[in-house]
Amino acid sequence: SLFFITVCTADGFLHYTVTDCEFNSSKLNDIEYTQSYYYNKLEYIRFSSSVGKYVGNTEHGIKNAERFNNGPEVITRRGEKERYCFRNVGIDVEADLTKSGEC
């Protein structure tokens, strides 16, 4: 699993984004890309490659999901599974296989 977090603070409130690639093989169909946005520990919107669009979890998130799904953001996110995950998963799987063969 590849996992990245971006954190920003403003006036004591915490906003962060979690980008994740979950996989059980290096095949593209076995990879799920997600990007979740949090505000004060509450996930308010998420993009999932298995759903193919943004889904809002709060009133604010629902409004943003609608806007993102009708703009260029959703097209960009749909390409991240192949561009970001698939490329890096192959590197990670190869590194793990190389390490497992060492004594």
Image (cartoon, rainbow, N blue to C red):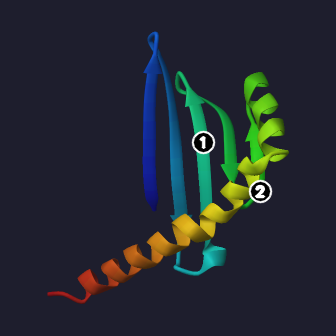
User: Please, which residue is most extreme toward the front here?
Assistant: 72
- How crowded pointer 1 is (Cα within 10 Å; few <14, some 14-19, many 20+) is rated as many
Locate residue 68, reporting x and y percent: 77, 42
| Amino acid at circle 1 | Ser
The residue that appears at 44% across and 11% down in the rendered structure is 12
User: Please, which residue is most extreme toward the left here?
Assistant: 103
Locate residue 72, reporting x and y percent: 76, 50
- How crowded pointer 2 is (Cα within 10 Å; few <14, some 14-19, many 20+) is rated as few
The residue that appears at 44% across and 39% down in the rendered structure is 6
**Do the residues under discs 2 and 1 have CB atoms within 8 angstroms?**
no
| Amino acid at circle 2 | Val
Dot 2: element? loop
Q: Is residue 79 above or below residue 41?
A: below
Q: Is residue 34 above or below residue 66?
A: below
Q: Quadrant of the C terminus?
A: bottom left
Locate residue 71, reporting x and y percent: 80, 46
Left or right: 34, with 63 as reference point: left
Give the alpha-carbon distance from disc 2 to disc 1, as whole Å.
13 Å
- Which quarter of the figure has residue 50? bottom right
Q: Can residue 23 be seen in this view?
A: no
Q: In which quarter of the image is the N terminus?
A: bottom left
Check disc 1 and report the residue beneath it: 36
Q: Can residue 64 be seen in this view?
A: yes
Q: Quick one: 102 or 71, which is closer to the camera?
A: 71
The residue that appears at 52% across and 50% down in the rendered structure is 19
The residue that appears at 60% across and 59% down in the rendered structure is 33
Locate residue 75, reporting x and y percent: 75, 57
Check disc 2 and report the residue beneath it: 51
Q: Sequence-wise, which precedes: disc 2 or disc 1?
A: 1
